[in-house]
Amino acid sequence: MYVSPDDLSAFAWGAPMRDLAAKVGMSDVGLKKLLHSHGIVTPPQGYWNKVHARKAAPERPKQPPRQPGQAGRIRLDKRFSSLIAETPPVAVDGPFESTAVPENLEELRDRELKAIGRVAIPRNLDNPHAGLVQLFRNEERRRQKALQDRWYWNKPTFDTLLAQRKLRLLNGLFHALGRRGHSGDAYDERGELSARCHIGNMTLGLSLTIIGKHRTEMIAGYNRPARDLPASTPLRLSLMRDFRTKVTAAWQDDADGKLEAKLGTIAADIIVAGEAAFRQGLIEAVEWEEQQRKWREQLRRERLAALEAKRVEDLKKSGDLLRQAEEIRAVVARVKAAAVGRDNGISADELKTWEFWALGYADRLDPVLSGQVLSHLRSVEDDL
């Protein structure tokens, strides 16, 4: 289920945490951690003592406005379903505006450009962004093992001049995004540097590729850029997503300058792309639901057709069985009529026994008497 931040905040301030936790079915410590993870401020220590004593107590803080890329809703599990009303998503046609997000994406870009300002990239990676720390730790572990054992195969992956430049670019970009409350991270994917940005609730994949032809070499079974490529090798940074609205989703080294000089613009463009992805996601969710509806309807029609075919088959079978039963009864009647007054060596008891058996068999075949016909009397719609 999804709830609004304001409703969740009202819930958090509606009763002592221990009482709320009991209603949810979890510990008060666990509930408080959950609320804090969603950015919900909880009442301070002693708040309810002041309320009960009718003393001045702090007011519930207002929730911050929706930021770029944010859904404006918080996902909770079903334990909260009877405690907080579910909030529907933003309508596909908006409005999307909040005090932090203008309706017009160009206006959002101008605002973000002004807020981010100039982005300077340090010459080294001594102050890595949190999103790069794990990558650097893994690199350092490989480096230390390689120093201890010259036969160690898993050597540092990103110690080349070009890879270091890529990492500096990402470091500067992530720090710039961090100024606006967003983040990013990078990781090793089979010896390739992969990265992504987190704009509100949206995650956008990033690709850093070389422009034009370049030398390659086989590294750990993969064809990778040659390790001795210079740091000046032209690069292209792009978002790994298709957009329906007009947004800038790719930047590169060109006559207008290197990527390093464009990081402020890139960060603003990515924030706009995150908001565009959120708005597009609303449309895609409606489209996906419509596709699912059509798929379910197609399955229903196919099932209906199969049931109808089975019903027709059963009806024909009933007709065949009924004809067979009637033919047997006709045979019995003819035999009885032919046997009357004739000396054919068949006693009356034998004839009666045979008649009982033959008519019993006919009754078992008869779809009305056996109940077989009942299997296809109901409408096929009842079986869906």
Image (tube, helix red, strand yellow):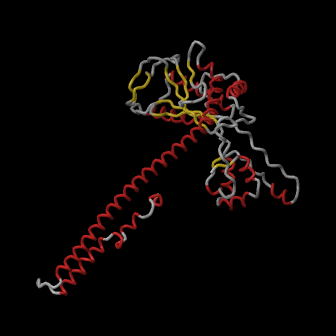
Viewer-closest of 75 and 159: 75
In the picture provided, is 295 more to the left or to the right than 371? right
Viewer-closest of 308 and 368: 368
Q: Residue at x 88, y 55 (%)?
A: 55
Q: Is residue 248 above or below residue 292?
A: above
In the picture provided, is 181 more to the left or to the right than 186? right
Residue 283 figure quarter: top right
Figure label count: 0
Residue 112 position, x and y percent, is 70, 27
Q: Residue at x 69, y 32 (%)?
A: 180
In the picture provided, is 294 more to the left or to the right than 10? left
Q: Is residue 147 above or below residue 263?
A: below
Residue 218 position, x and y percent, is 38, 26
Residue 291 position, x and y percent, is 51, 43
Residue 47 position, x and y percent, is 81, 54
Viewer-closest of 301 and 70: 301
Residue 367 figure quarter: bottom left
Residue 132 seen in the current view: no
Residue 249 seen in the current view: yes
In the picture provided, is 92 more to the left or to the right than 373? right
Q: Is residue 381 above or below residue 135?
A: below
Q: Residue at x 39, y 54 (%)?
A: 306
Viewer-closest of 105 and 37: 105
Residue furthest to the right? 55
Residue furthest to the front? 341
